[in-house]
Image: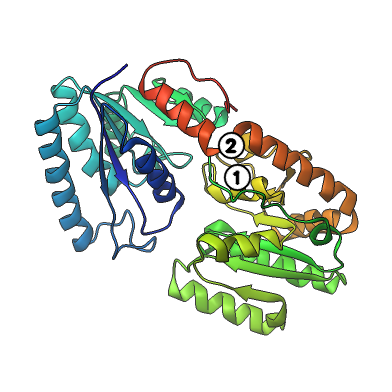
Amino acid sequence: MNKNTLLVLNIPPPYGGGEIRAQLLADYFKNSVGYTVYSYSRTKSSKKTQGKFLFPNLIFGIEFIYSVLIIILKKRPQRLFISLPKEFFGFFRTSTIIMISSLLRIKVYGDLAGAFFTFLGRKNSLKYYFGKYILKKVTSIRLLGPSIKEVFEGIGIRNTVYFSNGVYKPLNRTIKKEVIYNNVLNLLYVGALNYSKGIEKIIYSVDQCLKNNLSIKLYCIGEWSDEKERKEIESLINNLGIEEHITFHGLLIDKAKWDIFSNCGLLLHPTNWDGQPLTILEAMGLGLGIISTKVGAIHDTVIHERNGIILKRNDSRNLTEAINLFYLNRDYLASVSKNNIEDFNNKYTTDIFLNNFFNWLEDTPLNKGIL
């Protein structure tokens, strides 16, 4: 058993998927023999400014590098776990820690919360070559699914492993039959409210469903990423005249969040860019049907027609058709709901995730919950 591992964890706030998962790891490893947890949070940060080259981020970056290196020099760990930011500015900050750890012969285990690194999208650039050089210094990179691993292997990065996330769900919480078979089908969106996550498509789809005489309501949980986009979407809703069918709850946690989940039948997640959103796993755990897109590890997680619908094209027309399919066939929605609860219990619980994470750090075989 490894006796000296340091985990660097960015815990909430903000309440993004990576931060929530980090809190789970911090709680699990903080009392484990041979493990040291260095946790930090950025209470004044938000998804709007994350990864951008701004003065507060620059100051934080310098302080972060200094703090982590001091702990490394004091503890002299055999292994280091650290998240790998998708954006170049955050990655460049972390690269300093990776390089120094490599020089000190510390094994580095890195975790990518999303589907890809933005700076690897433009081949033959300096950022591309620098990024690949640093990533090859990492002992093992944890990815979220086989589809993501295949993309990395395509550009020559093979020091990777994949296993699924795991999430907490309240005991004995699942959607009830009356939610599935109720005349009004409640739809749910959870996450950052912006165009890239598909909020505009969802609004147009809700409008089309209402014009098709479907009795639906949409509940949105999350924060706006951009004030301009918020105003544009609110104006769109007003122009369409569908205000009474849409409720924005803002950021919700704990019981307030689960109360909304439990009263919805479908999760809508028509994203353009994601890895394996925790909200999809949460929805599966409670038995919601899923409508999402073929990006990242989502289609490794949401098996088309078993766990929900993977859209052929990410547009409001296809989203409307998928909602209509579930609305008109509630027995199919009930079947999907049952499948999702079963698959969650077999693959995506916190116990399975933490067991695989521990085995990964210990270089022992991964077992349950592999996609």
- The foreground one among 237 and 307 is 307
Q: Position of residue 347 (x, y in %)?
A: 61, 32
Residue at 42% x, 43% y is: 24
Give the residue at mark 1.
281
- Asked whether the viewer can see residue 60, the reply is yes
Report the quarter where the C terminus lies: top right
Question: Which secondary structure lies at badge 1?
Answer: helix
Q: Position of residue 220 (x, y in %)?
A: 60, 67
Tag on residue 213? none
Give the residue at mark 2.
348
Identify which amino acid the numbered label 2 is placed on. Tyr
Mark 1 is surrounded, within 10 Å at the Cα level, by few (under 14), some (14 to 19) or many (20 or more) other residues, namely many
Q: Position of residue 101 (x, y in %)?
A: 18, 28
Q: Is residue 11 left or right of residue 314?
A: left
- The foreground one among 173 and 40 is 173
CB atoms of marks 1 and 2 within 8 Å: yes
Residue 365 against residue 224 in the figure, above or below:
above
Q: Is residue 186 left or right of residue 327?
A: left
Please tell me which of labels 1 and 2 falls first in the chain. 1
Q: Please, which colouring scheme is shown?
A: rainbow
Residue 139 against residue 74 in the figure, above or below:
above
Identify which amino acid the numbered label 1 is placed on. Leu
Instruction: Answer with the quarter of the image where residue 6 lies.
Output: top left
- The foreground one among 41 and 226 is 41
